[in-house]
Amino acid sequence: MTEIDAKIDGLIPAWLTLPDIAEAFGVEVTRVRQLVKEGQLIAVRRGENRALHVPAEFIKDGKVVKGLVGTLTLLRDDGFTDEEMLEWLFTADETLPGTPAQALRENRGTEVKRRAQALAV
């Protein structure tokens, strides 16, 4: 869990707290904390009370967006920090088009993963 800087915070349009996600998933907050601990979600401290938040684009239809977990694993294996992963996922790429996070939400995860793998080369 990372403190987020203003630049990256500005890239991400909407955030959810861990209790918000737990409610959407129909599980206890401890389960959402476990997903963060396992690296299936990225949570950062932000706001006045420094509560943990997850980018809202990571959640769709009551579950983690398809392809996100694999993409996060690839980026971690490439040596990316949580902040670097967020920056990459939420920076627009006109060749994609849009951001990698948007592409994942639109079920274009294969292309996102291919690009994540290419970062390691």
Image: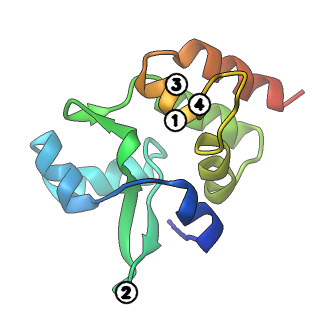
Question: Which residue shows up at 37% across the image and 86% down it?
Answer: 48
Alpha-carbon distance for marks 1 and 4? 8 Å
The residue that label 4 is drawn on is 98
The amino acid sitting under disc 4 is: Gly
Label 2 amino acid?
A: Glu
Residue at 19%, 34% in the rendered image? 62
User: Which residue in the structure is indicated by mark 3?
Assistant: 103
Residue 41: give x, y in percent of width and height: 43, 46
The residue pinned by badge 1 equals 101
Label 1: element kind: helix
Outermost residue, bottom side: 48
Foreground of the two, 15 or 71: 15
Q: Are marks 1 and 2 in contact (CB under 8 Å)?
A: no
Numbered disc in front, either 2 or 4: 4
Earlier along the polypeptide chain: callout 2 or callout 4?
A: 2
Residue that lies at the very extreme toward the right in this rendered image: 121
Tell me whether the residue at label 1 lies in contact with that at label 3, contact meaning CB atoms closer than 8 angstroms.
yes
Q: Secondary structure at mark 2?
A: loop
Residue shown at 27%/51% (left/top)? 32
Residue 5 visible in the displayed image = no
User: Regarding mark 3 in the picture, which secondary structure is present there?
Assistant: helix
Question: Which amino acid lies under the numbered mark 1 shown in the image of this protein?
Answer: Ala
Q: Are marks 3 and 4 in contact (CB under 8 Å)?
A: yes
Q: Earlier in the sequence, mark 2 or mark 3?
A: 2
